[in-house]
Amino acid sequence: MKSDDLLVPTITRRKGINGQIKQRSEDFIVREKIDETHTLDPRIETHKLPGKKGLFLHFVLIKNNIDTSAALDWIANLWKVKRNDLSIAGTKDKRAFTAQRVSLWGVKKKYEEGKLKEINLPKIKTKSLCFRINEIRLGNLWGNAFQITIRDILTDMTQTKIKLEDKISEINDLRYLLNSFGQQRFGTIRPITHLVGEKLIFGNIKEALKIYIGKCYEDESQEALKARRLYWETENPQEVLKIIPEHMHIERKMLRELQKHKNHKQAFFSLPLQFQKLFIHAYQSYIFNKYLKIRYEKYSKDLSKPIDGEKVVDNMVSAPLIGNKTELLGQTEEIHSKILKHEEVSMQDFNRPLVMKLGGRGSYRALGMKVYNLKIDEIAEDEINTGKTKAILSFELKKGSYATEVLKEIIR
């Protein structure tokens, strides 16, 4: 299920090209842009990473059609290191071909003894190993560069080119698109991260785990659905572990902890810290998307001028990602009050110790998203879909912005 309630509507007016993305993972290439001079390309296996020499191992993670968290789990298991010692600047799309920096603490001796080798698996590669002075933290990047193949386009190459040029012109004239959180923030097949986050806001870890492990969405495999239904109905980890598919790493980890300790809190905190924080952040993102939609449709469509209560941060008009440190004023308070009342949540709920522990302080996020260097790379016959057209586009976005939100404007 892809609930429209999670997402923000498109704002461009010209007709889109009505194609499909991610028919293959290689159709969605993501290159992490560290700064203006360092961009990591998954098609290149050797990179020179910036920074002075130090004690943190830095490397390039190249992954193909695998979730970032699952890839890091594999690396921790293969290298026999603690999962929490692996740090990244940001997660990348699952169904994509991506490259990003990772840092790892405490392995210099192991590396020098030759006990830590490059990983070369079909879905995961670790390349350009070197030691640098700083740990990589969330947000330590400029943004991402994308090359996207849109397939299954009904119009011929000439008409597709005309439509795309019109769309690109319109996007450039607008200056900003809505900087909403994309579907993958909440889950593409199972949009549940904000639902788990909502339970955590109220301190209900047992219900949070029940949703994460047991809530069913029909796009999953029959094996996964069978395991989820069993947990939803029985909450018996021992029985579910007998049938749950091997690839469901996070669920299996939590179920093993529940089986061993019979403690939901302990099972949740067995997850990597960055993964724990994902759920509270997803709920904050859900509220932000609701705010952005109301603000744009009912208050002001001008993303370059703040309404009462918004701030200008780094030359961008920004609104709160609400948390326990958020101060709501003016029209931003008015909008958030309506949203929180509808959601049956109060600002006091963000003061719970669990929320503060999981990064629920709150911050500000730009309302507008600037698309850099948007261009057509190629328009050709689609070799996968007979008689259809494909288009290859490239563009860059600053950190925190979602390529799928740009593509939504182009396709619809």
Image: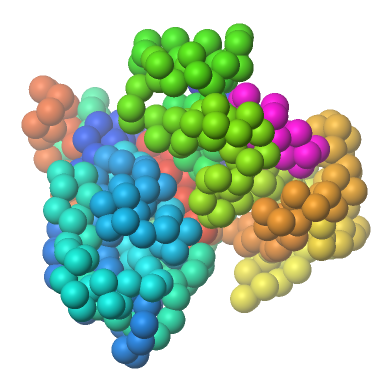
Taking the spot 63% from the left edge, 29% from the top edge, the residue there is: 262
Left or right of residue 87: residue 312 = right
Query: At 23% from the left edge and 73% from the top edge, which residue is drawn?
Result: 111
Q: Quadrant for residue 213, please give it.
A: top right
The answer to whether residue 272 is above or below residue 225 is below
Residue 408: x %, y % from top left: 44, 39
Look at the picture and state if 175 lies above or below 277. below
At x 71%, y 72%, the residue is: 312
The stretch drawn in magenta includes residue 203: yes
Instruction: Give the residues in magenta.
Output: 195-211
Residue 94 placement, left or right of 203: left
Magenta span: chief secondary structure: helix
Q: Residue at x 9, y 31 (%)?
A: 383
Please check the rendered image and state whether residue 138 is part of the magenta-colored stretch, yes or no. Answer: no
Could you say where residue 396 lies in the image, as x and y percent from the top left? 37, 62
270 relative to 208 in the view: left or right: left
Task: Tell me the colour scheme of the image.
Answer: rainbow
Q: How many marks?
A: 0
Residue 244 position within the rendered picture, expressed as x and y whole percent measured from the top left: 40, 20
Q: Could you tell me which quadrant the C terminus lies in?
A: top left
Closer to the camera, 100 or 270?
270
Q: Is residue 270 visible?
A: yes
Relative to residue 102, is residue 268 depicted above or below? Answer: above
Question: Left of 38 or right of it: where is 230?
Answer: right
Residue 390 at x, y = what percent? 19, 37
The furthest residue to the bottom:
52
Q: Quadrant of residue 86?
A: bottom left
Observer-nearest of 385 and 12: 385
- The answer to whether one can see residue 397 in this image is no
